Amino acid sequence: MDGRQVVLNRIRRGLKDVRKGEPAAVGQANARKTGTAEAPVDWVYGQPTPMDDVLGRFVERCADYKARVERVAAADGVPAVVVRCLADAGAGSVVCPPGLNPTWWDAVATAGIAAHGDEPPLSKADLNGIDAVVTTATVGIAETGTIVLSHGDGQGRRVLTLLPDVHVCVVAADQVVSDVPEAITRLRPFVAAGRPLTWISGPSATSDIELARVEGVHGPRTLIVILVG
């Protein structure tokens, strides 16, 4: 029996003596005794949380997590910024996952940066020797500065964003949502399709060792976000 089944069995035992509908009945009885009714909650899961500037909040929170953020007005400006970010990070080689915009790939190769494809899949040893990876994203979350990959076209396998030291991630403005519930709503089709999700909040880091922050332990040391639009 795995850990998940153990937990579920404990929950079932804990709820064994709870009658169906009992919480609602208790709430109604208390309302009758006190002469008050429960206040209605005008909220639906997945609705956007009002924000003055969703993109501005996203940029601010990404920076809080020590990610570098570059804003680009239009998609045709992305290739040059990708090349500049890779050069600034000192990357001499990069992996470009299947489905990545070919103009980005061409710009990288023209700049003299060794561009590697992932078909057939690169070995872990090969990936460990490559400096950077460039991907797109599925969702960006303004409230938490989180980027979510669903590993479709342009996002590659999960391991591609874990072994190289630098991750350049291109996020479109219309992919940025206000908060986690809104993100979950957008991600439901990918979950239903059985796709893995990778949630990224800044460069890889841990503080488990003597409470000292250590970066790059289980992922890239440098995260560069290019926000388009």
Image: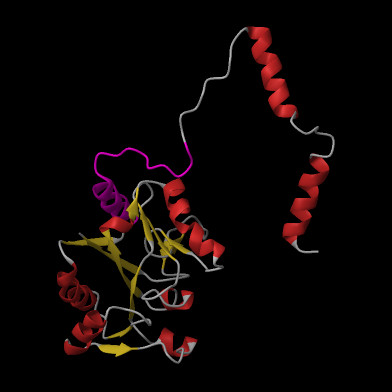
Query: Would residue 207 be visible to someone looking at this image?
Result: no
Query: Would residue 135 be visible to someone looking at this image?
Result: yes
**Quadrant of residue 91 within the rendered picture:** bottom left
Q: Nearer the viewer, residue 104 or 134?
A: 104
Question: x%, y% of residue 140?
Answer: 36, 57
Question: x%, y% of residue 138?
Answer: 38, 63
Above/below status of 23 relative to 33: below
Question: x%, y% of residue 149?
Answer: 42, 66
Residue 93 magenta-highlighted:
no
Q: On the rendered structure, is 214 left or right of 1?
A: left
Above/below status of 216 relative to 20: below
Q: Nearer the viewer, residue 73 or 109?
A: 73
Q: Nearer the viewer, residue 53 or 102?
A: 102
State the extent of the magenta-drawn residues as a range.
Answer: 44-65
Question: x%, y% of residue 150?
Answer: 45, 67
**Residue at (78%, 56%) from the top-left corner?**
6
**Residue at (23%, 79%) from the top-left corner?**
104
**Quadrant of residue 67 within the rendered picture:** bottom left
Q: Nearer the viewer, residue 92 or 161?
A: 161
Residue most extreme to the bottom: 120
Quarter holding the C terminus is bottom left
**Residue at (77%, 34%) from the top-left corner?**
20
Residue 59 magenta-highlighted:
yes
**Residue at (32%, 37%) from the top-left corner?**
50
Q: On the rendered structure, is 192 left or right of 222?
A: right
Color style of the picture: secondary structure
Q: On the rendered structure, is 211 left or right of 221?
A: right
